[in-house]
Image (spheres, rainbow, N blue to C red):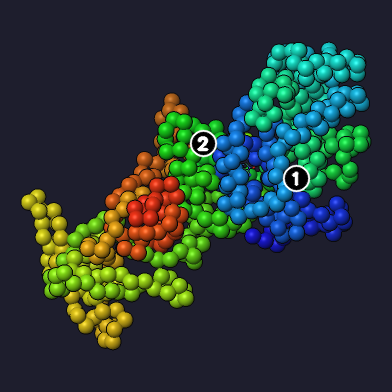
Amino acid sequence: YTPRSTHFISNLIEADRQNGKWGGRVETRFPPEPNGYLHYGHAKSICLNFGIAEAFGGACHLRFDDTNPTKEEQEYVDAIIESVQWLGYDWGEHLYFASDYFDTMAACAESLIRAGKAYVDSLSAEDMRAYRGTLTEPGKDSPFRTRSIEENLDLFARMKAGEFPDGTHILRAKIDMASPNINLRDPAIYRIRHAHHHRTGDRWCVYPMYTFAHPIEDAIENITHSLCTLEFEDQRPFYDWLLEQLAEAGFFPRPLPRQIEFARLNLTYVVLSKRKLVQLVTEGHVDGWDDPRMPTLVGARRRGFTPEGFRLFAERAGVSKSDGWIDMSVLEECMREHLNDSAERRVAVLDPLRLIITNYPEGQSEQCFAPNHPLKPELGSREMPLSRELWIEREDFMETPVKGFRRLFPGNKVRLRYGYVVECTGCEKDAEGNVIAVTCEYFPDSKSGTPGADTYKVKGNLHWVSVAHACQAEVRLYDRLFAHPQPGQRREGDAPEFERDFLDDINPDAKRCLVAQLEPALAQVAPESRYQFERHGYFVADRVDSRPGAPVFNRTVTLKDSWQK
Ligand code: ATP
Ligand code: MG
Ligand code: MG
């Protein structure tokens, strides 16, 4: 990831550096609220912030924006730390909690009151909304706007001391109720909230509003460039106004942090809103936050997606100033590219049918040699035992072949990959007429890698596993969680009274479990080992359920984009 190369944010930062602003220093931050698990969208923000710090020789902070006491939990803090580390980023000593700044934030608020730039309002929430005005009409001053500095200081102190119930008073910045930007019409900065905080306990019963807290967090940490998503663009004037006041009051040195907005990631075939992700989990539509179908980073990890794939994706998705959609196939292709390069090859038969080589001696076996990676001979090869009975894919046999079928049918020859050429002689059936075994004869002088083997010209090339040596294992085939690119969006053919919900678009086939036959080399793999199963796709040993000796594999992605639109 080389953000220095092209996009508008790196250009702005480069310009700031050339002008010597902040002495050329670059410091960014990734500020998650610990109220849920990170998702693919966060990965974009993480790659952007940490990537910029890396490219400019700066630092990126991991800051927990834990100013809202009611929704935050330690469980999420731990999971977020693990996911950022998993993506391969290092914040060094820069791990921060916004709740550690509550004292400074309260002091900032008091300083604004002293400067006549904040007041305690006691309007009801409903009246406050009415006084705010609209996009086309200016707001009106609250009758409490003219309270004296002494009265405001006293009321704020009593708010902090817990004298008032939730919602009775609120501290507001005093800016301009007629501003065309509604965010500057005396925004709320501190509210009363009698709630237990996961880190500060019951020490506080007033909590800062996000728009007040965030600029202060950035300034305390000496952030140079505060990158955020587009919906905060209209907040930038308040961000700048607030830090100006606090710089004047001596809280922070100049130059102050600079907010820059970018378009959030919108990805097809998933949902990236925390509310919807919570719903998927709590209503049991998936098997938890780390279900491989979930667009969370813990889910991605279990699915077998790779940090390198995410970095490639962040680079390809780019950084833009206007909202757009990225197709899921772009993310899948990034994973495929990294896995094609990095994953060793193995053989697995997912829908096993018995193949009997009738002229191969019973009780005997021999080794075949399979390269671990076709493009990387340095990765060597492994032994694959071959014997009289093999597992092949059910779809590789047709008693009566359709036109163009090149695999096994009576009278046809195929190569058993890394092994012999065989000629199909027939099949065995059960009482209902189902094929239960295919029979063939092999040509002893046709073994791959032996002299003369290539005089056999055959069109089919099948993978197989020796029945006597196979490792039977659970394989889970995952696919896209939603069957529609924009889940929940109304579309042609919907009845007028039908209100489409994102849950209506869940893909019922996004998880299928099979019992597969694996080559013996897969029996002992460590959890999270990733492989290409030849002809099938990329798979990972499940990090939760897989054990050496009893592997469980998840399909990460197919070999080619096979999504049926
Ligand atoms: P939600 O609104 O679903 O709760 P959020 O944006 O509030 O998500 P945070 O934990 O506050 O979640 O996000 C941390 C950082 O990640 C923020 O800086 C935010 O801008 C960024 N981020 C969140 N979602 C996306 C996305 N889809 N694309 C890019 N960046 C994102
Ligand atoms: Mg949020
Ligand atoms: Mg947020």
Q: Work out how far the residue at label 1 is from the one at label 2, CA to CA, in angstroms.
A: 26 Å
- Residue 468, percent from left and from top: 22, 63
Query: Which residue is at 41% across, 62% downward?
Result: 532
Q: Is residue 300 above or below residue 403?
A: above
Is 283 placed above or below 20 here? above
Q: Nearer the viewer, residue 161 or 433?
A: 161
- Checking the image for residue 495, the label placed there is none
The image quadrant of residue 154 is top right
Q: Residue under circle 1?
A: 226
Tell how many labels: 2
Q: Position of residue 184 (x, y in %)?
A: 80, 29
Q: Are marks 1 and 2 in contact (CB under 8 Å)?
A: no
> Which secondary structure, mark 2?
helix
Q: Is mark 2 within 8 Å of ligand 1?
A: yes
State whether residue 392 appears in this view: no
Which of the 4 image quadrants contains residue 406? bottom left
Dot placed on the residue nearer the N-terminal end, 1 or 2:
1
Residue closest to the far left: 431
Q: Position of residue 285 (x, y in %)?
A: 42, 35
Please, is residue 141 above or below residue 304 in the view?
above
Crowding at mark 2 (Cα within 10 Å: few <14, some 14-19, many 20+)? many
Q: Nearer the viewer, residue 398 or 418?
A: 418
Residue at the (79%, 43%) spot, across then down: 221
Q: Is residue 77 visible?
A: yes
Residue in the image at 67% along x and 26% along y: 201
Residue type at mark 1: give it: Ser
